[in-house]
Amino acid sequence: MITRVFSVRVWAPVGVLTSLAYCLHQRRVALAELRGAGGQRFVDRSLLELKMVQVVFRHGARSPLKPLPQEEQGGMFAGQLTKVGMQQMFALGERLRKNYVENIPFLSPTFNPQEVFVRSTNIFRNLESTRCLLAGLFQRQKEGPIIIHTDEASSEVLYPNYENCWSLRQRTRGRRRTAYSQPGVSEDLKKVKEGMGIDNANEVDFLMLLDNMAAEQEKTVPCRLHGR
């Protein structure tokens, strides 16, 4: 997800509401002025100035978090970024370079820590994904050290964190048990496991099966980001 925004400094809670109302009013006025006959909008892009770009992305393709009992990881760790995943993130970096270095001269062609702030969760596949994206974006050229900012697992907010959010724990407590108590679900899971030759005593559920299927499908797609 890519978000382009104008930077705004807010000094007080009252200022937030005032600024928001003013911005909405200005936006309505600007849209009204830009509308021509027939309701068409005309925007002179030369009058626009890009202030900031926020890029939010997930990691690339990875190995299953919990491999099925009869499956082998091929020497990989659970949840490890695969070669395909590295290619995906490098390709995404190249796309960003084309957009914000070549087409729009927003970023310098080499990494400059004064221009780019990098944030990641402290999970190895995510750190690797970030490094691959930066390699594609800046073609391994840099003017200073590349620092990837992370947070402690106990206070991380970039993923659903059950450790530090009491409300999240309460809302999700018992959901899996409730789901499998629905009519037919347990029976369907048993049939699937039997068809795959998995002992019913093994703790394999539909989420685990889905995760393994998704990881297997990624192996057949060299790089989904090229050509888009």
Image (tube, rainbow, N blue to C red):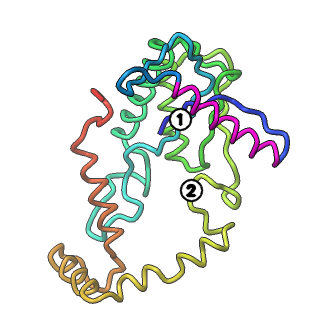
Q: Which residues are magenta?
A: 13-32
Report the front residue among 227 and 32: 32
Report the front residue among 94 and 51: 51
With 216 as the anchor, is 50 left or right in this view?
Answer: right
Residue 136 lies, with reference to residue 77, above or below; the image says above
- Quarter of the image for the C terminus: give it: top left
Residue at 59% from the left image edge and 31% from the top image edge: 27
Name the kind of residue labelled 1 in the image. Answer: Thr
Name the kind of residue labelled 2 in the image. Answer: Tyr
Q: Position of residue 16 (x, y in %)?
A: 76, 44
Residue at 29% from the left image edge and 67% from the top image edge: 209
Residue 122: mark: none
Q: Position of residue 75 (x, y in %)?
A: 37, 52
**Residue labelled with disc 1:** 3
Q: Secondary structure at mark 2?
A: loop
How far is disc 1 from disc 2 in space, using C-alphas? 19 Å
Q: Given the current orientation, which residue lies at the most extreme right position?
A: 12
Q: Give the class, few, some or many, for how many residues have Cα within 10 Å of label 2's Cα (few <14, many ≥20).
A: few
Residue at 33% from the left image edge and 56% from the top image edge: 73
With 154 as the anchor, is 140 left or right in this view?
Answer: left
